Amino acid sequence: MKIFRRTQTRLRGPAGDSPASVFGRRSAAHRRGWRSASRRGAAIIEFALIAPLFFLLVIGIIEFGRALMVQQVLTNASREGSRRAIVEGATVSDVQNVVTTYLSNASISSSTVTVSPNPLTNVGFGDPVTVTVTVPFSNVSWMSNPWFLGGRTLKAVSVMRGERLQ
């Protein structure tokens, strides 16, 4: 008899309810299912609020990453142009061809190459030669209409001393 009473007291609810009224209530699993359905609605709302900021961040990372990559290519192209400009017998068109070939190998077009002094025949030993390469970012962006850097112009300048004999 003691075992039966112990079992009966376990079936009673927190307020001392009878076993029938305890079984008549909603089960914990049923309550959890209702809560998870309401959490799914909250997750959708949270995603709708955060998604635009997340996508803006991703687009910004892509755009700035492309700008840094193109800037590095421009810097390398201007260095190659400067190396060509400082040697004996180089002309401005030779320098421009070296730079445009380097840029076209990197799939960058519509650049402007400026060499100073022009013509290079006036360069003596130790005189500085400057090669400037510019390109509008809108021409090299992977996006059709860049958001952050659309009106910017990327520029690289290299200066080397002439190695010509006098």
Image: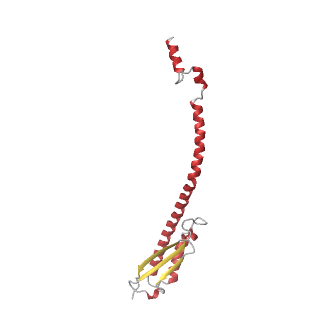
**Of 57 and 89, the residue lying toward us:** 57
Tell me: residue 1, above or below residue 104. Answer: above
Which x, y percent locates residue 52?
Answer: 57, 55
Which x, y percent locates residue 138?
Answer: 57, 70
Q: How many marks?
A: 0
Tell me: residue 14, above or below residue 35. Answer: above
| Res. 88 image quadrant | bottom left
Tell me: residue 51, above or below residue 145. Answer: above
- Coloring applied to the structure: secondary structure
Q: Residue at x 44, y 88 (%)?
A: 122
**Of 138 and 96, the residue lying toward us:** 138
Which x, y percent locates residue 94?
Answer: 51, 81
Q: Which residue extends farthest front?
A: 15
**Of 53 and 77, the residue lying toward us:** 53
Which x, y percent locates residue 121?
Answer: 46, 88
Question: Where the C terminus falls, by quadrant?
Answer: bottom left
**Of 11 and 119, the residue lying toward us:** 11
- Image-based side of 122 in relation to 51, left or right: left
Q: Residue at x 57, y 49 (%)?
A: 47
Q: Which residue extends farthest top?
A: 1
